Amino acid sequence: MEQEFKITPLTRVEGHGNVIIRVRDGRLSEVELNIVESPRFFEKFLEGKPAEEAPRISERICGICFVAHHMASVKAVESAWNVEVPEAAWELRELLNLAGFITSHTLHLAFLALPDLLDLPPEKRHILGLGEKNPALLKQALAIYDYGLMLTEILGGKRVHVATAIPGGMSKIPSQEEREKLLSLASAAQSSIEAMADWFMENAERKAELLNYPVRTKYCMGLVKNGAHELYDGNLRVVRPDGGKAYEFRASEYLEYVAERVSPHSHVKLPYLRKVGFPDGVHRVGPLARLAVADRIRGDLAPKLAERYYKFFGKVPSNMMAYNAARFVELAYAVEASKQMLEEARFTKGPIRVEVKEKAGEGVGVVEAPRGVLIHHYKTDEQGLIRMANVITPTAFNAPSIEQDLAVIAENTLPSILGGGREETFWKMEVLTRAYDPCISCATHTLKIVVEESP
């Protein structure tokens, strides 16, 4: 006898997804993570378009991590055309990328994750329930979010789908008045981070029991620069499940290390480590992975939080609640780093743009999006038109890992799934999925097409 159980839809995640659990003769037979968001075809949309338009087109993949797509795309174009941007433009881009982290991490923690960390009844596990339970905490989170939004708007030209990163540099620079406004908001955000720090880390540790299942440690991949935690540029480093370094390579070499396959039940590509193979080469990206691959993290508060994180969760965690704790460490880093960059204002010292000339070429742009490694890969012709585009998103990297982890929970809670406690189990499976913070719209880039010819 076969039984099928569904979690549909997954809640408090971006996009539309389901989990299907199949049991045959009382034994778990399979668990599927169904990414059912309609395929987007952005790689095809880009073909034939002028490459300078790609940063504005590709960021429409998502309304949350648009900054990261904007940055990865413009870096790919510049790589194809051998463009070196001025240092001031580089600074502005790093600062804009930090703005994307501040807004996205705060959005996830406050609206999606924190309701799971508070002892709320099921009907109150949402942002309004958080506001009722701890209004001061919600106010602090909104202060951080407001700073991230304003930083995005001033540097990117708009709050959503920014427009200022162009091949050769940046198109605008904040005025002195705008910088002073941002510094005021940055100070308020920094105060909120410091006020939240102990409370958040304590609750992440206390609620680690929610996901205390024998989930395997996996390979982790993320950017590093001279071994340090990095969000905008550097080498890709992969560490083994035991924490030892497996590979470190340049963005342009990613095809030597990353392969992709198609899922039979999901509109998502499944990347894996080419030299390890599938499924053992499934790996994690995102905040947990970035802390796993980094030797150190910069700042004042962030290193202290990271030390606490490593002490409780370990260097390569197996408890997925570590994702939320790592996300808060990164949020502290992003607020600190952006405030320091605004104070130093090195982006005011020099030109922010150089002239570029289109050419035939091939380039890869890699940044860390809030959810993990983001890759844009383009080929252009002599007129600068895109002839090939490939995008690998963080949620695509994480999708097979999420599915494997859900199978572990299902196996360990099978009696409750078959019995009367499945609602609590399904909630915990959603907690695990939310910990990865999947951005499902970004991940849907593939569809199996069958062509039937009439006789």
Image (spheres, rainbow, N blue to C red):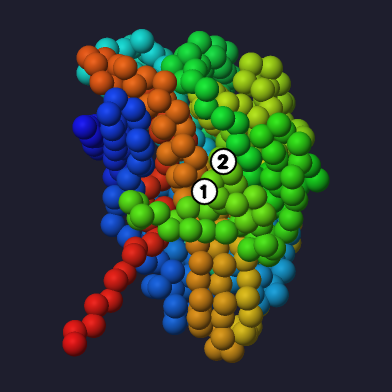
**Residue 104: percent from the left, percent from the top?**
46, 40
Q: Residue at x 56, y 30 (%)?
A: 216
- Side of 35 where 303 appears, left or right: right
Neighbours of disc 2 within 10 Å: few (<14), some (14-19), many (20+):
many
- Side of 250 where 167 appears, left or right: left
Relative vertical location of residue 211 with respect to residue 277 in this rendering, above or below: above
Q: Residue at x 63, y 40 (%)?
A: 219
Rendering quarter of residue 413: top left
Relative vertical location of residue 435 with respect to residue 37 in this rendering, above or below: above
Q: As shown in the figure, which amino acid type bears the numbered disc 2?
A: Arg
Q: As shown in the figure, which amino acid type bears the numbered disc 1?
A: Phe
Rendering quarter of residue 38: bottom left
Disc 1 to disc 2: CB gap under 8 Å:
yes
Pick whichever, 450 or 378, lies toward us. Answer: 450
Q: Residue furthest left?
A: 455
In this figure, which residue is indicated by the disc labeled 2? 284
- Quarter placement of the N terminus: top left
- The label on residue 397 is 1
**Residue 347: percent from the left, percent from the top?**
68, 54
